[in-house]
Amino acid sequence: MKELKEDELICELRACGISPSPQRVGIYGFLKTHPIHPTADLIMKELKPHLPTLSLTTVYNTLKLFVSKKLVSEVIIEDGELRFDADMKDHAHFKCLKCQQVFDLFPEGGKMDTSGLPQVPSNFTVESVHICLKGHCGSCQE
Amino acid sequence: MKELKEDELICELRACGISPSPQRVGIYGFLKTHPIHPTADLIMKELKPHLPTLSLTTVYNTLKLFVSKKLVSEVIIEDGELRFDADMKDHAHFKCLKCQQVFDLFPEGGKMDTSGLPQVPSNFTVESVHICLKGHCGSCQE
DNA sequence: TTTATAATTGTAGTAATTACATTTTTCGAT
DNA sequence: ATCGAAAAATGTAATTACTACAATTATAAA
């Protein structure tokens, strides 16, 4: 497991106006080092050994706080499971219908070209774009 | 409420290999005449007066059946609420963060141009594309 | 009409999330 | 240092969307 410098994490949290408690640093650090779009439940399971007092409520509260401060984003792919992503760069997702894995799809040149997508009416304002493809990944072809 | 000819609905159901029970016709008819991406719960509420014996289990079973037969599609926009859409034409969605309404976004020319989106690795196969924008609709600008 | 099959129903169960009251921690002011 | 207020974390209980399952009802072929 790659380790990030705590100082950097703390710095990023502060920059978003979040006071860096051990739980918050732990959760944010986990998200940064594990770009696997984990659910709250998985984060809890993985972090409990390192933060024995951690409660599931705190995980949920913290993730909601991160989202409201735009430090991480929600990834909604299947019903009934909310996932989280600390990578705020423009990207899409791909979920394999067989192995269930979620892959990141980064655009060439770093910027997503949404010009081909349907336009919203001119008096609408867009705040976020969520794109998810589903199919079968390389290892799951028949 | 616009009324569709039952015969047509029944015909479409049969074409997908679905035997047209009153409940199924009712649910499919509701979806066709109300392109509002309803949840199972809403469908239940709206249809109960016309189909007094309808049960929520039937609504869920029926929707799942429709999806498996590719007669309708699931629309996942927020966590914890699965929506359904009988419009199988290529289109995206827009959800207003204020009034919560979900709008359809149809592409010019009927075909969605996804060429600008990030490419999947060449050994992946894509079966569906889900695109949802979020922001504020025309009536909800401040 | 009988009988097998398919569809519907209601109840009870599960899983993810949230509400809330209590406890613990943090941190500035004395 | 220590007091006290505000912030954060915790555990339990409640809520909500959905599913499993067993029992009943409807359908349709023989």
Image (cartoon, coloured by chain):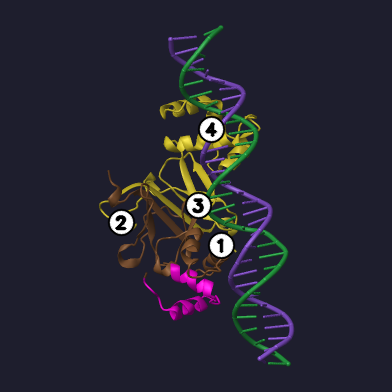
Chain colours: A brown, B yellow, C green, D purple
Between the residue at mark 3 and the residue at mark 1, the CA separation in whole angstroms equals 24 Å
Q: Give the range drawn in magenta.
A: A2-30
- The three-letter code of the residue at mark 2 reads Gln
Label 2: chain letter: B
User: Does residue A126 appear in the picture of this structure?
Assistant: no
Write down the residue under mark 2: B119
Of residues B102 and A36, the one nearer the viewer is A36
What amino acid is labelled 3 in the image?
Ile
Mark 1 secondary-structure assignment: helix
Please, what is the dominant secondary structure of the magenta stretch?
helix
Horizontally, residue B99 falls left or right of residue A105, namely right
> To which residue does mark 4 refer?
B29
Asked if badges 4 and 3 are on one and the same chain, I answer yes
Q: Do labels 3 and 1 share a chain?
A: no
Under circle 4, the secondary element is helix
Q: Distance between the residues labelled 4 and 3?
A: 23 Å
What residue is at 55 percent from the left and 39 percent from the top? Answer: B34
Between marks 2 and 4 in the image, the one whose residue lies nearer the viewer: 2
